[in-house]
């Protein structure tokens, strides 16, 4: 009897089955999207290091927005490069100690000028703590760090915007605040971050 009803109402049966199929595919799609987002967030958190301690003037765990109590932190002293020696002498368990300072500035090449670039001044241990994958070229050497040689590693977006093709950036010389800097390496394209963190695509690392 039920089979006869289904055969009589073929259109209704088709639409019902079609609706069920679409519903199943929607559920699968949502689950796949959620799983992908979860993996991306886990990878970004993992990139910060599970055995790394960050020292900074600001308390990032407090969040942002209009309710952020900035007045509690604004008068705190910023970490200084000279304090690395102090930490090394008193922290025997620290394998690497990295220092970085960040400013946002313009980067120039020939007649091109790129604004709002993250400029990171880093020391030789930075790469050991914050793993940096290069698509081409090499990282800044220890000798270049020690001698203060004007070389940089640039992010994918910076290289692409200044040179058209990122690969063309190697061995080129860019200018930041009037200083000429030679490019030794290009950081692999990172893509949009879900939780903030390091935006290496739009960055330059200076020794």
Image: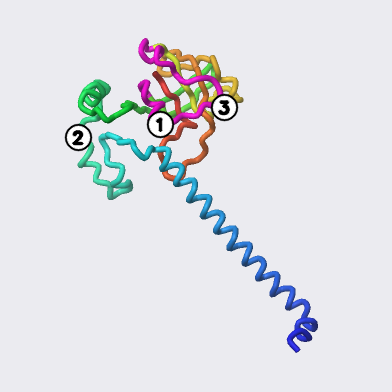
The answer to whether residue 158 is above or below residue 175 is: below
x and y, in percent, of residue 50 in the image: 36, 40
Picture quarter containing residue 26?
bottom right
Residue under the image location 59 percent in, 58 percent down: 29
Lower position in the chain sequence, tag 1 or tag 2:
2
Picture quarter containing residue 72?
top left
The answer to which of 131 and 186 lies nearer the viewer is 131
Lower position in the chain sequence, tag 2 or tag 3:
2
Characterize the local packing of mark 2: few (<14), some (14-19) or many (20 or more) Cα atoms within 10 angstroms.
few
x and y, in percent, of residue 110 in the image: 54, 16
Task: List the single residue furthest toward the bottom.
Answer: 1
x and y, in percent, of residue 97 in the image: 31, 27
Which residues fall within the magenta stretch? 121-148
Provide the residue designation for mark 1: 130
Provide the residue designation for mark 2: 75
Rounded to the nearest whole Å, what is the CA distance between mark 2 and mark 3? Answer: 39 Å
x and y, in percent, of residue 40 in the image: 49, 45
The answer to whether residue 69 is above or below residue 109 is: below
Quarter of the image that includes the C terminus? top left
Element type at marker 2?
A: loop
């Amino acid at each position: 009897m039920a089979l006869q009803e289904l055969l009589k109402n073929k259109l209704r049966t088709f639409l019902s089955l079609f609706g069920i199929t679409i519903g199943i595919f929607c559920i699968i799609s949502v689950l796949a999207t959620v799983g992908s987002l979860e993996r991306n967030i886990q990878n970004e958190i993992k990139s910060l290091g599970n055995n790394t301690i960050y020292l900074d003037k600001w308390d990032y765990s407090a969040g942002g927005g209009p309710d952020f109590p900035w007045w509690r932190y604004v008068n705190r002293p910023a970490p200084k490069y000279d304090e690395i020696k102090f930490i090394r002498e008193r922290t025997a368990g620290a394998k690497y100690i990295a220092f970085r300072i960040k400013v946002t500035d313009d980067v120039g090449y020939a007649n091109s000028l790129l604004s709002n670039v993250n400029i990171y001044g880093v020391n030789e241990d930075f790469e050991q703590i914050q793993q940096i994958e290069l698509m081409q070229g090499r990282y800044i050497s220890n000798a270049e760090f020690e001698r203060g040689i004007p070389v940089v590693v640039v992010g994918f977006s910076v290289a692409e915007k200044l040179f058209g093709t990122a690969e063309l950036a190697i061995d080129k010389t860019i200018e930041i605040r009037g200083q000429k800097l030679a490019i030794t390496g290009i950081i692999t394209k990172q893509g949009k971050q879900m939780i903030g963190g390091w935006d290496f695509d739009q960055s330059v690392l200076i020794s």
